[in-house]
Amino acid sequence: SIAPWRRATATRTNTIRSTNRWPPYTSPVPDALDISFASGQSVELYAFACTLGTPGCQAKADGLHLQGELSLSGVPLLNNSKIKIRELLIGTDGTVRTVTADVGDGLNFSLAGWAAGIQALSINENGLKLTGDLTVRVPASTPSKIGFNNLTISKTALYGGDFSLPAAGLDIFGIVQMKPGSRPLSFGRIGNPSVHYIGGSGEFRLPKFLDKTLTVEFFQIQTDGNFQAVVPTNFNVPLLGVADISVRSIGFNTKGSIGIDVMGDFNLHAIPFFQASVGGVHFGPNGSVSIDELGVGFDLVGIARLNARARFIDQPERKGFEG
C-alpha cells in the first residue's frame, strides 16, 4: 500500500506528480502512431471496397487516420474506376467521421464510355456525389463538355444528377452551336443495356439566309455515336427578302452527306403568281450552303402554261433566283 501523502495524481500534461517534494516524473505520450497494413488489405466504406495504403496511416487520440484507394469495381458504367482517398477518419467509437477524396486538378475516368472529369466529390451512406463534366461528341462535330452536379453513384446504380449544356453551346457538325432550351437534360439508358444517352431541349440559329431562332423540342446523344433531334416545323421564314419558305422538315444528316437540311415550299415575291415549288436549303460543314434549283410554273389562262427552272445566286453584287 502507498501512504496517502505519497499517492500520485495525473495531470493533463501527462506528468505524474507526487504529493511530496521529490522531482516530478514525466512519461511522454506520442501524438500519433504509424500503422502498417498487409498488401491489399481493405475495409468496406459505405459498401465500397477501400484498399488501405501503408504510408500515411496513423492512430491518434481521436481515432484512426487512414489513406487508400476506393474501388468502383462492379458499379455500372464506371469501368472499374478508382478514386484516391486522402483521408479516412474512423473515430474511437468506430464511426466514419471524415472522408476526403483527392481530385487534385481534376479526376478523370470513363462514364458509360464518355470521358468524365470530376472537380468535386463527396461520399456518405447514400453513396458518391459527383460534380464535373462529360465530354460528348455529335458525329462529325467538335467534342463538347456537358456539365453535371449531384450525380449519385451507389454500389449497384448511377442515378440523379443535373446536366447542362456548355455556355458556348453543343457543336453540331461545325454548323451551329445548340444552346440550352426550356427542358432540362436527362441521362439514361435505352433498350440496349450498354447504350446510354443524354437528351433534352435546345435552340439554335442557322449561320445564314434563314433569320430565325429554331427550337429543338428534343435531342439525344448516345454512347454508340448516334444523334437525333426533333425541330417543330410548319412555319414560314423569309429568305433574303426575295422569297418565303414554308418549312416542312428539318433534318440532321450524320451519315453520308453531313449537314442540316431545311425542306419546304418556296414562294417567290417578285412573281407572286408562280406556283410554290418544293426545295431545300442545305447547310454543310465549313460554312457551305446550297439551295436546290426550283421548278416553277404558272398558267396564262386560255393562252399558255409556262414551266421554268430557277437557281439561286449568292454573289456579293446580287442575290436571288434566276432562270
Image (tube, grey):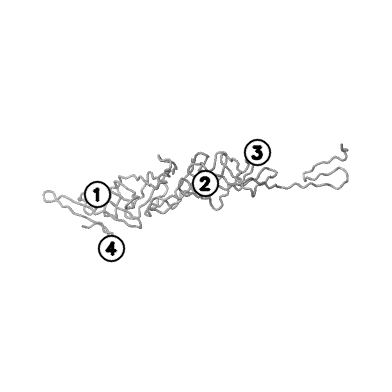
Q: Earlier in the sequence, mark 3 or mark 1?
A: 3
Answer yes or no: do the residues labelled 3 and 1 have beta carbons within 8 Å? no
Structural distance between the alpha carbons of marks 4 and 1:
26 Å
The quadrant the N terminus occupies is: top right
- The x and y percentages for residue 157 are 49, 39
The residue singled out by tag 1 in the image is 278
The residue singled out by tag 2 in the image is 81
User: Callout 1, which amino acid?
Assistant: Val
The residue singled out by tag 3 in the image is 94
- The x and y percentages for residue 237 are 30, 50
Q: Nearer the viewer, mark 4 or mark 1?
A: 1
Q: Nearer the viewer, mark 4 or mark 2?
A: 2
User: Callout 2, which amino acid?
Assistant: Ser
Q: Earlier in the sequence, mark 4 or mark 1?
A: 1
Q: Earlier in the sequence, mark 4 or mark 2?
A: 2
**Residue at the far top in the pictured view:** 1
Q: Nearer the viewer, mark 2 or mark 1?
A: 2
